[in-house]
Image (cartoon, rainbow, N blue to C red):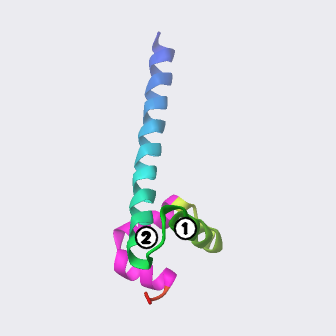
Amino acid sequence: MGGECDDLRLRLAQLERALATARVIGQAQGLVMARYGVGPDQAFEVLRRLASHANVPVRDLAADLVADPGAALADRLGPTG
């Protein structure tokens, strides 16, 4: 019984991390969409390519963008226009 509870706790923690990651990526997608007038698929592709270029996970790139949207977007994506 104890092992089963431990497994369930581990699975719950994994699901909570996955949900938090999805939320942050969604927020970053929204920032890219709003700033550059692209759709959700294009915004995710921008995030994916930037993360690949920087050799970081998409979740880490997204967290940086969400933490400081103005500076991070300008630094990584360039000005609007």
**Residue drawn 39% across and 70% down?**
31
* Quadrant in which residue 67 is drawn: bottom left
Label 1 Cα neighbours within 10 Å, binned few <14 / some 14-19 / many ≥20? some
Gap in Å between the C-alphas at discs 2 and 1?
A: 8 Å
* Quadrant in which residue 51 is drawn: bottom right
The quarter of the image holding the C terminus is: bottom left
Q: Is residue 26 above or below residue 53?
A: above
Q: Are the residues tagged 2 and 1 within 8 Å (C-beta)?
A: yes
Is 66 inside the magenta-drawn segment? yes
Q: Which residue is mark 2?
A: 33
* Relative image position of residue 60 (x, y in whole percent): 49, 62
Q: Which residue is mark 1?
A: 42
Numbered disc 2: secondary structure: helix
**Which mark identifies residue 10?**
none
Numbered disc 1: secondary structure: helix
In the image, the segment drawn in magenta is: 59-77
Is 25 inside the magenta-drawn segment? no
Amino acid identity at mark 2:
Met
